[in-house]
Image (cartoon, rainbow, N blue to C red):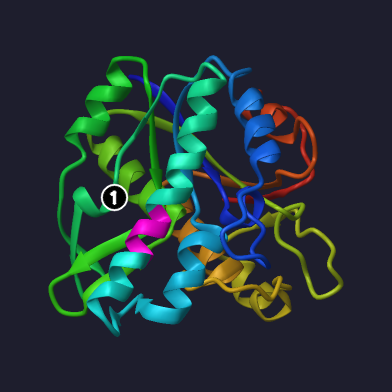
Amino acid sequence: MKEIILVKLGGSIITDKKIAYLARKSIIRRLAKELKQSKQNIILAHGSGSFGHTSAVKFGGKKGYISKIGIARVARDAMEINRIVMGILITEGIPAVSFRPMGMILTSAGKIEDSFFKSVEEVIKQGLIPVVYGDVIWDKKWKSTIYSGETILNKLAMYLRKKNFNIKRIIQVGQTNGVYDDRKKTIPIITNKTWPNLKKFIFELKTKDVTGGMQHKVEDALKMANLGIETLLINGKTKNELSKALLNKKVKGTLIK
């Protein structure tokens, strides 16, 4: 059974969400170097940050769009940050292959109606690193929806489990030491049992995020916990935190299990 770790680089760490269309290339490059320290099979996802979110706030896309040229711009912006990330990964010697989510998934009212992940499965078997990202998804009822990078990862995880892949862990890399409470202190562990009481105390950075922000991340992770897959949220601004997480060393983050 092939073991896989899923890694998501959040839009908040690879872009400056306060400045439209600004990629943090030096951080992406450092995180790429940390990824190389792991000898495990990895599937990588990344967010859209100030690229896709900037245009999505203006033109829509989560439950439909206001104009055809508008949604085309949202789709282009999501692809542009992926182009930047892929350029850095390959320059750093990582055999990464990009998969565009809108070409693999069709939804209806936000729920997957059809998908094609077999090509991702084949790339993993060949020892390459598949890369997916937050993207516009075409929807039969709403016209369009938007899936975050972690949502795409979760869908892939569920597919790969059925194909007898062992999903060891999901690592989400953001710009905080995991999930903060109302005093901006890290909550070390979140479970389905503790979440209802913790939810009202969660602190979030107030930046544009059409995919739901930290609450969305936690609730998606709890769904994966029900399948026996834990999620670790860590700070990408801290040097070597990602490499330590990949090597199963202690980090300052939140474990959702």
Tell which of 47 and 181 is nearer to you. 47
Residue 184, given in percent of the width and then of the height, sits at 84, 67
Name the side, left or right, on which 119 lies relative to 91.
left
Q: Where 213 falls versus 13 (above or below)? A: below
Q: Residue furthest front?
A: 69
Q: Residue furthest bottom?
A: 66
User: Which quarter of the image is occupied by the N terminus?
Assistant: top left
Residue at point 35%, 42% (across, down): 157
Q: In this orientation, does residue 6 appear?
A: no
Please, what is the dominant secondary structure of the magenta stretch?
helix
Front in this rendered view, residue 65 or 157:
65
Residue at 69%, 39% in the rendered image: 27
240 relative position to 132: left or right: right
The span shown in magenta is 74-78
In percent of width and height, residue 19 lies at 66, 65
Residue at 48% x, 73% y: name it. 210
Q: Is residue 19 above or below residue 172?
A: below
Within 10 angstroms of label 1, few (less than 14), some, or many (20 or more) residues? many
Relative depth, front residue between 126 and 59? 59
Residue beneath the point at 37% across and 66% down: 74
For the residue marked with disc 1, what is the amino acid?
Pro
Quadrant location of residue 236?
Answer: top right
Q: Is residue 39 magenta?
A: no
Marks counted in the figure total 1
x%, y% of residue 81?
48, 49
Q: Nearer the viewer, residue 125 or 71?
A: 71
Q: Secondary structure at mark 1?
A: helix
* Residue 89 appears in the picture as rendered: yes
Mark 1 — residue?
A: 101
Left or right for 215, reference 153: right
